[in-house]
Amino acid sequence: MSAAAPRLVVGLGNPGAEYTETRHNAGFRFCERLADKLGVRFSHESRFHGFVANARDAGVWLLMPQTYMNRSGQAVGALARFYRIAPAEILVVHDELDIPPGQLRLKFGGGLGGHNGLKDTSAHLATNDYWRLRIGIGHPGDRNEVVNYVLKPARREEQGQIDEALDRALAAWPMIARGEWNAATTRLNARPAALK
């Protein structure tokens, strides 16, 4: 497991106003909040196929691919190659069906859980060995409903839980930024008291 601090944080989602509030855009929402916290603004960078922000003081790039979820790796790979960022220095933030709303999981490497954004990212990085912050959005209960589910906004109560999870993730950012992955994992993977 790598102890390197992240040099690139990627929020996965779909571009366009019609997707802004959907469950699938949880990664975008995290990146937007992190940019606010770090005092940086996104600008469109066509060579990186997305919105990019450079938090120089923190030594980290933020990226929101504008390629649609299934082609996210195109943007991740382009920026990582250009700035010579190793996969172990990348944190990908994404929605996760297999985790209830309000819960988080931080992990390094492992399987892709059927997430098309992760599949494409792994293909472009030629490895699964990068950090992921999984934001729980819950499962509709029927796999045939997954596409409709992720492309719709969460119910009000669930969105509140997701927002609280995003707040907890931001509170752990200083640990992540220092490469204190074990401490961040312990904090973020703990089930919040409100959900027990």
Image (cartoon, rainbow, N blue to C red):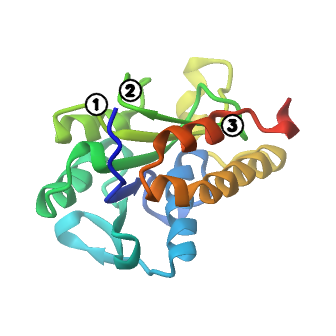
Choose the circle earlier in sequence order: 1 or 3.
3
Q: CA gap, disc 3 to disc 2?
A: 18 Å
**Under tag 3, what secondary structure?**
loop
Q: Amino acid at mark 2?
A: Leu
* Picture quadrant where residue 196 is located: top right
User: Does residue 29 lie above or below 120 as drawn?
Assistant: below
Q: Position of residue 48 (x, y in %)?
A: 21, 65
Q: Position of residue 181 (x, y in %)?
A: 47, 43
Q: Position of residue 24 (x, y in %)?
A: 53, 45
Choose the circle earlier in sequence order: 3 or 2.
3
Q: Amino acid at mark 1?
A: Asn
Q: CA gap, disc 1 to disc 3?
A: 22 Å
**Under tag 1, what secondary structure?**
loop
In this view of the protein, which residue sits in the foreground, 94 or 34? 34
In this view of the protein, which residue sits in the foreground, 60 or 12? 60
**Pair 2/1: label in front:** 1
Would you say 170 lies left or right of 59 here? right
**Under tag 2, what secondary structure?**
loop
Would you say 54 lies left or right of 25 here? left
User: Does residue 187 lie above or below 170 as drawn?
Assistant: above
**Do the residues bearing badges 3 and 2 touch, measured as CB atoms within 8 Å?**
no
Q: Is residue 19 visible?
A: no
Which residue is tagged 3?
A: 103
Specify few, some or many for label 2: CA neighbours under 10 Å numbering under 14, 14-19, or 20 or more: some
Q: Amino acid at mark 3?
A: Gln
Q: Position of residue 32 (x, y in %)?
A: 53, 67
Which residue is tagged 1?
A: 128
**Do the residues bearing badges 2 and 1 touch, measured as CB atoms within 8 Å?**
yes
Which residue is tagged 2?
A: 112
